[in-house]
Amino acid sequence: MRLTDVLGSEVIDSTGRKIAVVTDVRLVQDGPILGELGAAFRVHGLVMGRVSMGAHMGFERRNVRGPWLLKRFFALIQGTPHYAEWELIRSIEPDRVRLRVRGEELRVAEPPR
Amino acid sequence: MEYAGRMIDAGLQLLDRQIIDVNGEMAGNVDDLELTFPGEGTGPPIVTAILAGPGALSRRIGGRLGSWLESVHERLHPHPDPGPARIPFGVVKKFNAAVELTLPRAELEVDRLEKWVRDTIISKIPGAENEAATEEGG
Amino acid sequence: MKRILAITLGILTAIGGFVDIGDLVANAETGARFRMSLAWVVVVGIIGIIVYAEMSGRVAAVSGRPVFDLVRERLGARVGLTNLIASLFINFLTLTAEIAGVALALELASSVNYLLWIPVVAFLVWIVIWRVKFETMERIFGLMGLMLIVFGVVVWRAHPDWGSLIHGATHPSLPRGEGLPTYCYFAIALFGAAMTPYEVFFFSSGAVEERWSPKDLNVNRANVFIGFPLGGAISLMLMAGASIVLAPRGISVGTLSQVALPTTVVLGKIGLAVLLVGVFAATFGAALETGLSAGYIVSQYFGWQWGKFVPPKKAPRFHLVVMVSIALGALLGLTTLDPIKVTEYSIVLSAAALPLTYFPILVVANDPDYMGDKVNSKVMNFIGSVYFVILVVISVATIPLMIFTKAGA
């Protein structure tokens, strides 16, 4: 499976509604040892938002402080990003991700650091 | 849950980054990442490789341009049905603004088009090996 | 001496931005038709390119990554490709115009038709890129291009009414016979010329070619704060000269010899000779800049090895792109397409593509993972954002205005 197969996929919750699209895949470095890098990176969960523009700005990260105008503008377009840990995902299909839970149960995405 | 390991967002921090080999030479872009499900059980997939080159880029661009790119990739490849060029993730040393590898470029699959252009065209022009005329002192 | 020469990257970049063949004609034409009413646009353009060139130079010095790496990273593969294609197209038109511009300068000097000079110029541009060290190239053409300071001498020796010159610049007005849409069209053309994307492509790649590190941030600032104002000042002097000599006589500018007229009138043959050397150097420098930029942006998008800091054998695809671009540019020039018109179109079209290039720079300059503690200050962000909004507005207005005014006829 490729990363870009998942990015941009529709997210369908347990009631069958499309609630968002996948805007990013969060990885955590706690897998089996893999070369000089140490532990391998495993998928921790999916970040989702209203639109997937194929662009990655990084404005939602806490340590990025500006510019104010662009941050506000993209917050407006993207809406509040939400997060689904791996355990909450039922299946990953071509262009579609199905969740085990309802959209309302997802927590708001925090920057990974 | 508490995780001791580093956390990153793949699309923002890994995708589309410049790849640099062990000698500081440029070895392509992270055009995609290969995610592999672990053997038994239903754990989350692991990032097993970086995918680079026209074979990987074609899928992202899509459309007619993407298919053309795909056919360029296939034509340059000796095998009939090549997948995209793979850089096993274990070869990554570290990454920040760019992804740094532990191997030289020549040992990677991604060098194919570069070699072709070098051997067919550039090497034929005099002066191809030299560093540009140096200016001493100053 | 080396400290002084450290700013030649900024000077050469500025030359490509303010006094290449397109600017020479545009500034002269503007001075002839609008006198000093559009001078403020050049000043606004100078500030804009200073701000963004400083950011892109800083990013390159701290992270080693040039602008088009950032374009691909932040906009993604698809939108990045759109930017690449648009930028390449504009770059290509500009390169064609610069090669023809060098040929025109040589025609003025030698009375040999410029079409015959085009293949010679193309070959020379290529061989300089192939063989001459980046720093050497930068110094020779940057410093030789500064001969265009002769425009300032022209204005001084013409003993103009300084009061009315300054008044004209600070009180922009529409001369009789010119409409507001045309005024806006020229304003966009001048601003677009000052902030053409290839300037930051070249400047940031040049910073990496020169191996700038975080220790070189002062060098970055010196380059930007000296080089671009210098380039802008030269173009303002050109505008003033045309405003003094050509405007009262109702002479409009369409050829390089008309650009040179004020100099010939005021300073005679010697002035003309100095001017021609300066024009040759400036347009040749701009040809180098655009030729290299084509190679830089394609290679940086795909992740190929690029740069003059490695032997050509180590960057074959980069050099192939450069070679093909120069060859195609020469061929297009040989079709006797009017190089001046080509430049005018390329400037205006590049105005439309500006936001896509400058947006990633502004974003990355704020990213602490990239920049550590060298992120933008609030002031930088404010100015950068204001200019970004201006760029978007211009980008939207350009093509309709161009159609409406029939390209400034």
Image (cartoon, coloured by chain):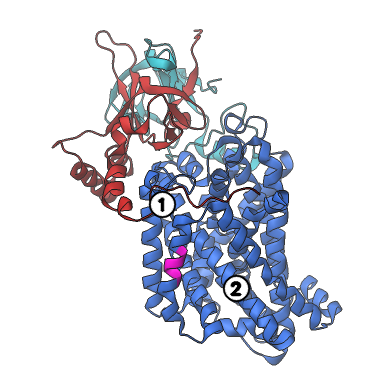
For badge 1, the amino acid type reads: Thr
Q: Give the side of residue C246 with respect to residue B38, left or right.
A: right
Q: Residue C328 lies in what quarter of the image?
A: bottom left
Residue B6 image offset from top left, x and y in percent: 50, 16
The label on residue C279 is 2
Residue beneath the point at 41% across and 57% down: C322
Q: Colour of chain B?
A: red
**Label 2: which secondary element:** helix
Residue beneath the point at 19% across and 42% down: B74
Residue C7 image offset from top left, x and y in percent: 68, 52
Chain in cyan in the render: A
Chain in blue in the render: C
Image quarter in which the C terminus of chain C is found: bottom right
Magenta highlight: main SS: helix
Mark 1 or 2, which is nearer the eye? 2
**Label 1: which secondary element:** helix
- Measured along the vertical axis of the image, is residue B128 above or below residue A38? below
Q: Which residues are magenta?
A: C121-125
Q: Residues within 10 Å of mark 2 (few under 14, many from 20)?
A: many
Q: How many labels sit on residues?
A: 2
Q: Residue C369 lies in what quarter of the image?
A: top right
